[in-house]
Amino acid sequence: FAWCVGLMFYQFGGLLTGEIGFNVWTVVAIVVLAGMLFQIFRPMPTFDKKKDKVAGELEVRAASRRRSGFGPEGTPSGLCPDVPRKDALCLVWSSR
């Protein structure tokens, strides 16, 4: 970053004072300046609404399960309904 700023100062300052002429490095300094300005003023990225909708539905389901204390089909919420109760991996995974 410091090298880019130094390049811009030297090239633009040299052009203003007449110390250097327009050359390839001046073009590079203009490109670097444009890239920095783009990074500062770029528009905020938009997120996919479909993903947000799915995440919201999952959060609502998880909250309702925590409130009721039970998961699907009356099984305790700390257990997976399709895996036997002795499976420790299921207990660890569901607690996250």
Image: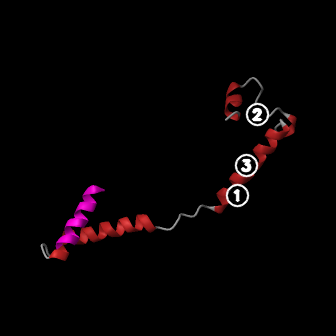
Residue 24 position (above or below residue 80): below
Residue 49 position (above or below residue 77): below
Residue at 70 percent across and 54 percent down: it is 54
Badge 2, how many Cα within 10 Å: few under 14, some, many 20+? some
Secondary structure of residue under mark 2: loop
Give 54 or 22, whichever is nearer the viewer.
Answer: 22
User: Which label is found at residue 58?
Assistant: 3
Residue at the farthest right position? 74
User: Which label is found at residue 41?
Assistant: none
2 vs 1, front mark: 1
Q: Is residue 54 left or right of residue 13?
A: right
In three-dimensional space, the C-alpha distance between marks 3 and 1, rounded to whole angstroms, equals 9 Å
User: Which label is found at residue 53?
Assistant: 1
Q: Give the residue pinned by disc 2.
A: 80
Of marks 3 and 1, which one's residue comes earlier in the chain?
Answer: 1
Res. 22 visible in picture = no
Dots 3, 1 in contact, CB < 8 A: no
Give the residue type that dot 1 points to.
Lys
Residue at 38 percent across and 68 percent down: it is 37
Percent position (x, y) of residue 12? 22, 71
Give the residue type that dot 2 points to.
Cys
Give the residue type that dot 3 points to.
Leu
Question: Is the N terminus in the top left, top right, bottom left or bottom right quadrant?
Answer: bottom left
Residue at 45 percent across and 68 percent down: it is 41
Give residue 92's quadrant in the image: top right
Q: Is residue 95 left or right of residue 5?
A: right
Of marks 2 and 3, which one's residue comes earlier in the chain?
Answer: 3
Give residue 81's quadrant in the image: top right
Residue at 53 percent across and 63 percent down: it is 45
Secondary structure of residue under mark 1: helix
Secondary structure of residue under mark 3: helix
Magenta span: predominant SS is helix
